[in-house]
Amino acid sequence: MDDVVIVHKNDAGSTELADLTESRLKGRYRIHRAISNQVPALGKDTPAGLEPKLVISLGGDGTLLYAARTWGLNGAPIVGVNMGRLGFLAEIEPERFSEVLDATLAGEAKIQERKVMDFSISREGNEIHRATVINDVVINKGAPARILSLTLSIGGTDYWTYRADGLILATPIGSTAYNLSAGGPVVYPGLEAVLVTPICPFTLATRSVILPLYFNVEVIIGEKSSDVLLTADGQQTFNLMPFDRIKVSRSKALVKLVLNPHRHYLDTLKIKLGLFYDQPI
């Protein structure tokens, strides 16, 4: 019997839909429940090492990110149902969930593979952490009054030094998240690229740059930079030290998202973000 994970927000609407979904699938699949943003051990009967056949996310984009990071990087399709406000990644409306779930279980749903990236933190020549991110790696300051010095190195050559509040290294999936709020570009999620976007740069001429993921892209923390934090997908935080090196690279993992059959990605940009809105000629 195959495993299905249902991840949901801890609110009445999401919990009710999770209960209905569990009742519907019980008997055909082993159902595992988890509350978003809780460690897997706290989820109901949810072993941390589970490799499910399907992941169902009932919540917003944060719930989907948590579900994907915890259970979706092994190739299980993820059905993201928007129970929140924006719902950019979780693009299935609750009223279409039953239809999409039936199509997914029958192997008839449209599924898109989206690229993610790995990042590592090295200190004094030793790698101290490595993980996978779906949206972004954000390097920023812990102290409000400080400005950071961050050097962007490509292929072992130092090209730019940013003086800014921080730096975002985003995947195309994450281009519509913090990257967009910081003035970065929207990039189609099927592309293999890393978006480098400064946060509140010291000079107005400093802008985002889009680089191929096969480049060896590293960020080096400046000698006088202190109180520096790295946040992965908004869900994990690490303290950084001067001269630490953060490297991003193509990941062997990928995320499979079940698409809304009634909406194209460009429609989502238009509807959710107000981009490409119609104007009279």
Image: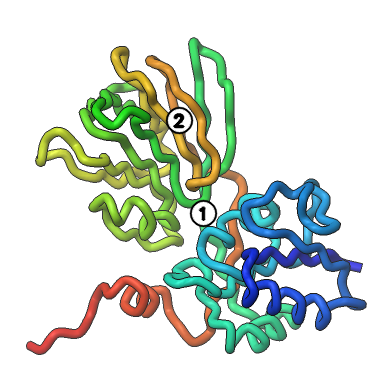
Task: Choose top left, top right, bottom left or bottom right for residue 104.
Answer: bottom right
For this rendering, which residue is in front, 280 or 166?
166
Q: Amino acid at mark 2?
A: Lys
Residue lying at the far left in this picture: please name it. Answer: 281
Determine the secondary structure under disc 1.
Answer: strand
Q: In the rendering, at what x and y percent does residue 259 appear?
A: 55, 75
Q: Is residue 163 left or right of residue 234?
A: left
Q: Which residue is mark 1?
A: 115
Quadrant in the picture for the C terminus: bottom left
The CA span between labels 2 and 1 is: 17 Å
Q: Amino acid at mark 1?
A: Lys
Which label's residue is closer to the chain start, 2 or 1? Answer: 1
Quadrant in the picture for the N terminus: bottom right
Residue lying at the far top in this picture: please name it. Answer: 124
Q: Is residue 78 left or right of residue 271?
A: right
Q: Which residue is rendered at x = 66% and y = 56% of the image?
A: 72
For this rendering, which residue is in front, 194 or 236?
236
Q: Which residue is rendered at x = 58% and y = 88% of the image?
A: 95
Q: In the rendering, at what x and y percent does residue 117 appear?
A: 51, 44
Q: Which residue is mark 2?
A: 247
Task: Choose top left, top right, bottom left or bottom right for residue 147.
Answer: top left
Task: State whether residue 150 is above or below residue 85.
Answer: above
The 10 Å Cα crowd at callout 1, few under 14, some 14 to 19, many 20 or more, is many
Q: Which residue is rendered at x = 39% and y = 33% of the image?
A: 217
